[in-house]
């Protein structure tokens, strides 16, 4: 299987934000943006894999600025990392005010996608050809994020399984909660 470049599967989706996408405050619902991000991630991952792909996780979703009705939202999706059957897709979202021509970055996140074969089982994906230092950096950062997430999940699950109220009491002091546990 031949390695593919980051540019090979780079995907840009642009959509006009219409009133039906907005909440009562006139800002675009986060769920609308997440749905668009999922579409961009799917298009990018499927292009790289050459197969159907499914979303496994969405990490580090950051809503940096609100998106307004009437703005053009562009989602840029690129493959940052590939595993055996998985891919980390980085999504950058920018909103453009067409009247003022100002562009603001509104969202970033990382989707982990897995390629599936006709039997609905994971299948190998092509390696990623890294051509720039920025691409190498993103690949390495994806590895690091995966390690940190795995360690955090392990620590959290261990703590969850061995929950002792006494260990958490100090942490809860000064928080906005009232302990009323019998």
Image (cartoon, helix red, strand yellow):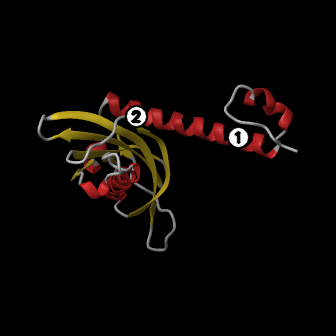
Which residue is denoted by mark 2 in the rendering? Answer: 138
Residue pointed to by mark 1: 156
Q: Camera-side residue: 180 or 18?
A: 180
- Quick one: quadrant of the C terminus? top right
- Crowding around mark 2 (Cα neighbors within 10 Å: few <14, some 14 to 19, many 20+) is some
Residue appearing at x 28%, y 44% in the figure: 76
Residue 112 seen anywhere in this rendered image of the structure: yes
Residue at position x 31%, y 55% from top? Answer: 21
Q: What residue is drawn where x is 47% and y is 52%? A: 86
x then y, percent, for residue 122: 50, 63
Q: On the rendered structure, is 142 left or right of 154?
A: left
- Direction left: furthest residue: 99
Residue farthest to the right? 182
For residue 32, what is the image quadrant? bottom left
Count of numbered circles in the view: 2
The answer to whether the residue labelled 1 contacts the one labelled 2, judged by CB atoms less than 8 Å apart, is no
Q: Secondary structure at mark 1?
A: helix
Instruction: Assign a secondary structure to mark 2.
Output: helix
Please indicate whether residue 182 sits to the left or right of residue 135 in the image.
right
Left/right placement of residue 155 relative to residue 11 reads: right
Identify the residue at the far bottom of this view: 119
Q: Give 6 or 94, whichever is nearer the viewer.
A: 94
CA separation, marks 1 and 2?
26 Å
Q: Position of residue 111 (x, y in %)?
A: 44, 48
């Amino acid at each position: 299987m031949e390695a593919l470049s980051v540019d090979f599967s780079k995907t840009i989706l642009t959509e006009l934000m219409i009133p039906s996408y907005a909440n009562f405050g006139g800002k675009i619902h986060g769920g609308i943006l997440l749905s668009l991000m999922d579409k961009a991630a799917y298009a990018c991952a499927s292009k790289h894999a050459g197969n159907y792909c499914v979303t496994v996780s969405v990490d580090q979703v950051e809503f940096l600025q609100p998106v307004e009705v009437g703005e053009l939202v562009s989602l840029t999706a690129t493959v940052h990392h590939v595993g055996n059957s998985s891919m980390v897709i980085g999504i950058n979202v920018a909103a453009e005010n067409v009247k003022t021509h100002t562009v603001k970055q509104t969202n970033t996140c990382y989707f982990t996608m897995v390629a599936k074969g006709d039997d609905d089982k994971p299948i190998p994906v092509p390696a990623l050809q890294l051509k720039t230092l920025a691409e190498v950096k993103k690949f390495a950062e994806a590895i690091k994020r995966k390690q940190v997430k795995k360690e955090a999940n392990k620590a959290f699950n261990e703590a969850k399984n061995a929950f002792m109220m006494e260990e958490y009491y100090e942490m809860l002091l000064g928080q906005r909660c009232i302990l009323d546990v019998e």
